[in-house]
């Protein structure tokens, strides 16, 4: 029987070393050490042995069991190592195209609007809204447009074809976001600092530079001692944050009925040092109209112009987005072509 | 407006020689914008006065001649094809390097070259080749009559200005005084801190002995601010002196004859429009200033006939309009070759009356441009004298044959403004010394008086109408002349409250990005509807109609976002098959109030297989993201554009915030879309953003294992899943999840039935479940299903 047991050990080692997978190894383990395994089969004959031999055989069987187990463990280790080595030897083409989740896009005008809002919000500005269908009063009268101002002529303004109200006020599509200056002051009182992003309309035929629907950002800052110098300061800070680059401001005289003095803003081209296509080789880019809020506008908002003063500005979000993303034609913003949208 | 810079400069002591670009900047940073300029000096470089010494035939070309051209010192051989060449002719000789317009169009630089094997040094120019007017019949520019010195450069020989500025009209709409040489000269002097030299004009009216007194009946005095009329006779029609013609031509004004040119010259120089009537058609017993009668025919100078209305101001004689006042004269009383006597008119009319009338008839004359901004009436007499002075250059024997008629209806009040220097500082954010403030104002023509706590400023007449009224108007003058660029950038000391959070904005931004991450593209459409769009909108009764629109696409304001999104989809189908878009936009609704209601809507659209369920899933993800309990309930009032059997109300916190549906195929057909199924959802985002967003309240999960079993349920085809789902869910307290994993219709089951397979999960928070628990749950499910006439399908 001792020989038989020793033979089993020999056979087992031989078989274990031939195993190439963990499954085979498990099978092998079972065939030698399992309940119905060959070792147990032999040990069934132990009961027929003399008592003094039984202990010795038992000892031997245990030894063999342990040996087989050790071999199995070793072989297992070998198999696992080999498997890992095989994985490590695999070649991969890391340049194959990635498998992407389907991706949409946020409209570039929304993206830039979020940026602008965030910057101004961090500077402590409120964000206000107002109606797009506006009254003639808020769009013009309240903003110091005289009754016969040419901007009131039909060719600039879309009128909504509803009857006038009893005060003779008419409905129109707002031609700028400025009515919300007055609405904002009436609602929130002064001091106030706010920006007003929104959609505006001009009754104008479309071409590469003209659009009948425009997106604007209006700014308003009224307090006791706000000056043109502050306007320059705020605007410089805003553009510097937006373009993440020190921006210089250039101011020139302008004309708007609702500001006095009125100025136009250019800012140093963030894309070049010595002139480029974007700035038309002038190193400065035209952006905004601004000025000190006209005392008549403050009066419309029930604010005493002898006590309060401040500035307002307005610029086209379309234009800013075009600069920001190097977009040549404003039409792209309105066509909603996915080939355009998916680039953002 | 074209302006000769040299002309302005001649009225100032400014003597620096700036480059055209520097001059442009000077005006841009202190006054107004310059659209462009023409540098004539630069343009005529390398072009000199030459003389043709001799002419020979070209051996190889019939139409070409070989000329020997003198530059005053040497003689050069030039091959030329001009049809009017002659010996001793004085010509414009373009030397190597000169820039010319080939055939009047393309710019080329002259080089010495060979033409048909004959050497040619430079070129003899035709007038259109060097921008000096049109040329005909292949003729070169013949300067013989001008008596020029051979060898002189052409620019100075012709006494041409250096620089023509093109001033942006829009940037001077609020400055009536800048629409003239004199006004611009004053501005230039103010900007450059130099002296301004006003125009000096003799007074020809001082010793006027004419006896005739002009009588005018003024029926509508509101038309006038001031009008001067004067009869001038003994005139001969001829060309204006060359200097006058040149100046007018450089300013883009067509020269006509001495009288018309003189009116234009005064207009351009002084900003005062004038008109001259031939007196032959004027009845001096019957002169009237009034509004026209409705439907009066008026044949104007521009060869057009206008239908006048009762809003058109006219000078009437012989029961006919002789001019549309301040706008255009009549054909009848126009100056002709035979004119020998005129009635000269200097008018300052009410700007709004002129603007209205001119706009209606779409007449934009130089006179209208000035009249519609209100002219300084104090200049009228000077303008008339200047007119006579110019006229005397060609008609030295002219006679003033009537007394001056001067009707000054609305005299200007003297305007003074108190200006506080402290306010100047507070507005501009920089301290400008009192003396400098006064200097700036004085240079602009304001008189100042320094009183202890403020400056008293007298506004000159040319700035006092519709222009400078208050102290802040003066601050603008000070700011711009001082230079806005000298003002520092200063961040203000803050006293405003920090802003609130903007839930609506934050939510829309978040959802925008989520939808983009789910594969949707944001679009931004116009706010307009056309007639067809309106037809498939639910709230067409509330739609606002436009009064004026540029195209039929804009006849109404939108009451839903769907039509424009369908148009987007159609456009994009040209390039791709799978389209997922969304839009945040407003709709506009008529209300009982004057102001309409505006609602911000979020709409989402998608096509392709299972579009409805995919869109619903995206929406569910978004709603669940805010921890909101929601329900998609089969709609009892499907939207007009919805498939009536595939439309659900989206209900959150008991409120219907929108709908989700498949678009009605009939609507798709109207938009010419052959797509089978397009899913769409439109949500009133205002309602959504007002929902109470709850924070997550953690549900502790059971430590005991769950068990699951499947049930296949046979029910009517039109049985809603939702009903079975909630029925199963409430069958037993132990059921914690019910999940649909298969639907089946077809063979093996009756035609009017379908099979829905659910996986049902049981869990107890406090103990391990037994097989008895499962058996009880199944029985409970069966009992519930019976109530809704569904049964478990035997496998
Ligand atoms: Zn640049």
Image: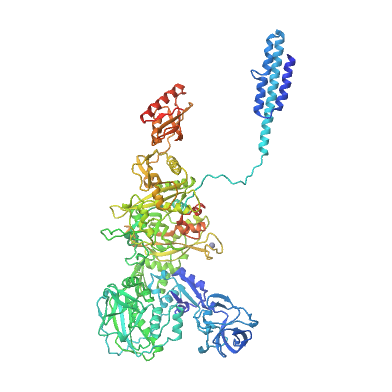
Quadrant in which ligand 1 is drawn: bottom right
| Nearer to me, B48 or A144 | B48
Residue B452 in sight in this render: no
Q: Is residue A293 above or below residue B270?
A: above
Residue B774 falls left or right of residue B320 = right
Q: Is residue A120 above or below residue B721?
A: below
| Nearer to me, B570 or B681 | B570
| Nearer to me, A124 or B105 | B105
Residue B543 falls left or right of residue B770 = left
Color theme of the render: rainbow
The quadrant in which the N terminus of chain B is found is bottom left
Location of residue B626 in the rendering, given as x and y in whole percent from the top left corner: 42, 41
Location of residue B517 in the rendering, given as x and y in whole percent from the top left corner: 49, 46
Q: How many marks?
A: 0
Location of residue B278 in the rendering, given as x and y in whole percent from the top left corner: 33, 85
Location of residue B431 in the rendering, given as x and y in whole percent from the top left corner: 43, 64
Q: Is residue B623 above or below residue A70?
A: below
Picture residue at 59% right of the left edge, 90% below the top = B53
Residue A106 in sight in this render: yes
Q: Quadrant of residue A93?
A: top right
Q: Quadrant of residue B437?
A: bottom left
| Nearer to me, B289 or B693 | B289
- Single out the residue that lies furthest toward the bottom: B397
Picture residue at 68% right of the left edge, 33% below the top = A82
């Amino acid at each position: 029987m001792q020989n038989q047991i020793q033979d089993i050990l020999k056979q087992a080692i031989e078989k274990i070393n031939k195993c190439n997978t963990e499954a085979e190894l498990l099978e092998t383990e079972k065939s030698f050490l399992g309940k119905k395994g060959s070792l147990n089969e032999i040990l069934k004959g132990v009961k027929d042995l003399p008592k003094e031999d039984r202990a010795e055989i038992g000892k031997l069987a245990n030894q063999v069991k342990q040996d087989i187990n050790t071999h199995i463990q070793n072989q297992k280790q070998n198999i696992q190592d080999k498997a890992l080595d095989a994985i490590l030897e695999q070649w991969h083409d890391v340049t194959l195209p990635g498998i992407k989740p389907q991706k949409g896009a946020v409209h570039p005008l929304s993206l830039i609007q979020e940026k602008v809002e965030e910057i101004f919000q961090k500077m402590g500005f409120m964000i206000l809204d107002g109606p797009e269908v506006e009254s003639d009063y808020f769009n013009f009268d309240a903003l110091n447009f005289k009754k016969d101002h040419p901007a009131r002529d039909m060719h600039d303004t879309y009128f909504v074809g509803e009857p006038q109200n009893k005060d003779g006020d008419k409905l129109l599509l707002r031609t700028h976001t400025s009515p919300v200056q007055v609405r904002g002051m009436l609602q929130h009182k002064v001091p106030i600092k706010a920006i007003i992003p929104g959609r505006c309309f001009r009754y104008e035929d479309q071409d590469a530079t003209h659009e009948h629907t425009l997106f604007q950002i209006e700014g308003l800052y009224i307090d006791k001692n706000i000056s043109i110098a502050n306007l320059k300061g705020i605007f410089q800070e805003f553009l510097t944050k937006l373009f993440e680059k020190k921006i210089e401001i250039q101011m020139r005289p302008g004309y708007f009925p609702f500001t006095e003095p009125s100025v136009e803003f250019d800012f140093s081209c963030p894309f070049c040092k010595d002139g480029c296509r974007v700035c038309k080789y002038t190193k400065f880019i035209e952006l905004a109209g601004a000025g000190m809020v006209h005392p008549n506008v403050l009066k419309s908002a029930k604010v005493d112009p002898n006590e309060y003063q401040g500035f307002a500005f307005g610029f086209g979000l379309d234009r800013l987005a075009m600069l920001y993303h190097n977009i040549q034609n404003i039409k792209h913003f309105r066509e909603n072509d996915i080939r355009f949208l998916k680039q953002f | 407006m074209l302006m000769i810079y040299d002309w302005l400069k001649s009225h100032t002591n400014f003597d620096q020689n700036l480059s055209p670009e520097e001059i442009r900047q000077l005006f841009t940073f202190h006054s107004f914008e310059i659209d462009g300029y023409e540098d004539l000096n630069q343009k005529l470089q390398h072009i000199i006065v030459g003389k043709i010494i001799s002419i020979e035939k070209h051996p190889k070309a019939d139409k070409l001649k070989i000329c020997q051209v003198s530059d005053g010192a040497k003689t050069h051989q030039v091959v030329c094809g001009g049809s009017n060449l002659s010996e001793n002719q004085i010509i414009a000789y373009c030397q190597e390097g000169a820039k010319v317009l080939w055939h009047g169009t393309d710019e080329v630089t002259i080089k010495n070259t060979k033409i048909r094997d004959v050497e040619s040094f430079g070129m003899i120019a035709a007038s259109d080749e060097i921008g000096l007017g049109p040329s005909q019949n292949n003729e070169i520019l013949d300067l013989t009559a001008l008596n020029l010195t051979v060898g002189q450069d052409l620019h100075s020989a012709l006494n041409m200005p250096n620089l023509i500025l093109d001033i942006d009209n829009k940037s001077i709409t609020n400055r009536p005084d800048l629409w003239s040489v004199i006004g611009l000269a004053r501005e230039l002097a103010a900007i450059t801190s130099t002296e301004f030299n006003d125009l000096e004009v003799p007074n020809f009216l001082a010793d006027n002995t004419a006896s005739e007194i002009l009588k005018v009946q003024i029926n509508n005095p509101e038309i006038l601010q001031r009008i001067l009329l004067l009869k001038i006779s003994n005139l001969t029609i001829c060309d204006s002196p060359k200097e006058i013609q040149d100046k007018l031509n450089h300013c883009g004004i067509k020269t006509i004859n001495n009288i018309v040119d003189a009116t234009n010259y005064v207009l351009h120089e002084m900003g005062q429009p004038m008109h001259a009537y031939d007196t032959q058609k004027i009845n001096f017993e019957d002169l009237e200033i009034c509004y026209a009668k409705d439907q009066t025919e008026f044949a104007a100078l521009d060869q057009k006939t206008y239908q006048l209305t009762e809003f058109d101001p006219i000078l009437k004689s012989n029961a006919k309009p002789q001019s549309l006042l301040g706008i255009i004269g009549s054909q009848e009383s126009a100056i002709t070759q035979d004119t020998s006597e005129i009635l000269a008119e200097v008018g300052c009319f009410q700007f709004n009356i002129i603007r209205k009338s001119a706009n209606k008839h779409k007449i934009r004359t130089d006179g209208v441009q000035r009249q519609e901004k209100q002219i300084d009436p104090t200049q009228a007499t000077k303008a008339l004298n200047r007119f006579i002075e110019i006229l005397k250059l060609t008609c030295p024997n002219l006679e003033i044959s009537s007394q001056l008629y001067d009707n000054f209806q609305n005299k200007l009040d003297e305007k003074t403004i108190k200006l506080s220097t402290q306010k100047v500082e507070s507005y501009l954010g920089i301290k400008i010394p009192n003396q400098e403030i006064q200097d700036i104002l004085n240079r602009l023509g304001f008189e100042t008086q320094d009183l202890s706590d403020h400056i008293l400023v007298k506004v000159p007449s040319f700035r006092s109408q519709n222009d400078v009224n208050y102290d802040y108007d003066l601050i603008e003058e000070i700011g711009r002349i001082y230079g806005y660029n000298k003002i520092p950038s200063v961040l203000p000391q803050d006293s405003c409250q920090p802003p609130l959070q903007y839930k609506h904005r934050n939510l829309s931004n978040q959802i925008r990005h989520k939808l983009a991450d789910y594969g949707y593209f944001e679009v931004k459409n116009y706010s307009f509807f056309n007639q067809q769009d309106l037809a498939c909108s639910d709230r067409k009764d509330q739609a606002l109609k436009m009064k004026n629109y540029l195209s039929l696409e804009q006849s109404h304001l939108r009451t839903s976002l769907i039509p424009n999104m369908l148009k987007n989809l159609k456009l994009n189908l040209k390039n791709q098959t799978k389209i997922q878009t969304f839009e945040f936009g407003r709709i506009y609704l008529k209300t009982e109030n004057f102001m309409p209601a505006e609602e911000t809507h979020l709409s989402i659209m998608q096509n392709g297989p299972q579009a409805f369920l995919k869109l619903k899933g995206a929406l569910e993800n978004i709603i669940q993201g805010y921890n909101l309990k929601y329900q998609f309930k089969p709609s009892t009032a499907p939207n007009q554009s919805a498939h009536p059997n595939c439309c659900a109300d989206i209900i959150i916190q008991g409120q219907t915030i929108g709908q989700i549906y498949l678009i009605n195929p009939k609507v798709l057909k109207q938009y010419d879309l052959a797509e089978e199924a397009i899913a769409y959802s439109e949500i009133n985002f205002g309602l959504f953003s007002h929902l109470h967003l709850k924070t997550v309240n953690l549900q502790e999960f059971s430590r005991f294992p769950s068990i699951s079993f499947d049930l296949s349920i046979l029910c009517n085809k039109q049985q809603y899943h939702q009903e079975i789902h909630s029925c199963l869910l409430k069958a037993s307290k132990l059921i914690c999840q019910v999940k649909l994993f298969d639907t089946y219709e077809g063979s093996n089951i009756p035609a009017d039935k379908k099979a829905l397979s659910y996986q049902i999960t049981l869990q107890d928070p406090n103990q391990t479940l037994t097989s008895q628990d499962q058996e009880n749950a199944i029985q409970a499910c069966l009992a519930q299903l019976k109530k809704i006439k569904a049964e478990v399908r035997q496998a």
